[in-house]
Amino acid sequence: MKLIILDRDGVINFDSDQFIKNPEEWKPIPGSLEAIARLCQSDYRVVVATNQSGIGRGLFDMTTLNAIHDKMHKACALLGGRIDAIFFCPHTAESNCNCRKPKSGMIEEIAERYNMDLHGVPVVGDSLRDLEAATRLGAKPFLVLTGKGIKTQAKGGLPEGTQIFPDLAAVVTHILS
């Protein structure tokens, strides 16, 4: 099975420092949904791993998060793509949970759910914490320069072997070539 793990905000859709709090605020980055469709057409399972501390902060509830994800699923489907599963952490950084990236609990759960070793599995993120969580399990880190990616690149300290691309579409072109 071919698997790819994507962060959501800043990779698939535009990010916001005020959080994506409702479906109207969720707007795909140009080319991202088409990239997901190309992955699906190449028999990849596309999984999203996303920190959603807005729930823990009381900015939105599970019903709203589900509505945001429903919009994302429908937008992908219109282009022939599919997101296989969405894993999320609803906790704030202060809760010190194991599922919040950069800790690897969410990524471990994906490995368990799909019953596979994640060594070499591409993980695409726009922040250091996305890449750190993935590389703990041997996944292959890809940084996109959308979302917080430019700031992440400028700060440095990226995991060894991180490949940098302008956006998800460019990552997918590279992976599929």
Image (tube, rainbow, N blue to C red):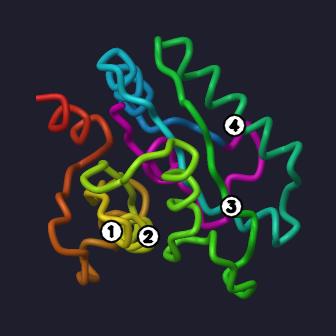
How busy is the neighbourhood of tag 4: few (under 14 within 10 Å), some, or many (20 plus)? some
In the picture of the structure, the residue carrying the numbered disc 3 is 52
**Residue 76 at x, y percent in the picture:** 53, 22
Q: Work out whether residue 20 can be spotted.
A: yes
Q: Which mark is residue 133?
A: 2
**Residue 93 at x, y percent in the picture:** 67, 82
Q: Mark 2 to mark 1: distance in Å?
A: 6 Å
Above or below, 87 against 56 in this view is above
Name the residue located 53 percent from the left edge and 51 percent from the top edge: 110
Per the picture, the main secondary structure of the magenta-coloured stretch is loop
In the picture of the structure, the residue carrying the numbered disc 1 is 135
Name the residue located 89 percent from the left edge and 43 percent from the top edge: 63
| Labels 4 & 3 near each other (Cβ < 8 A) | no
In the picture of the structure, the residue carrying the numbered disc 4 is 69
Q: Earlier in the sequence, mark 3 or mark 2?
A: 3
Residue 91, located in which quarter of the rendered image?
Answer: bottom right
Disc number lying in front (4 or 2): 2
Q: Mark 4 to mark 2: distance in Å?
A: 22 Å
Q: Secondary structure at mark 3?
A: loop
| Labels 4 & 2 near each other (Cβ < 8 A) | no
Name the residue located 69 percent from the left edge and 79 percent from the top edge: 97
Q: Mark 3 to mark 2: distance in Å?
A: 15 Å
Q: Mark 3 to mark 1: distance in Å?
A: 21 Å
Disc number lying in front (3 or 1): 1
Disc 4 residue type? His
| Labels 2 & 1 near each other (Cβ < 8 A) | yes
Where does the magenta region start and end? 1-25
Judging depth in this view, the residue of 115 and 68 nearest the camera is 115
Disc 2 residue type? Ala
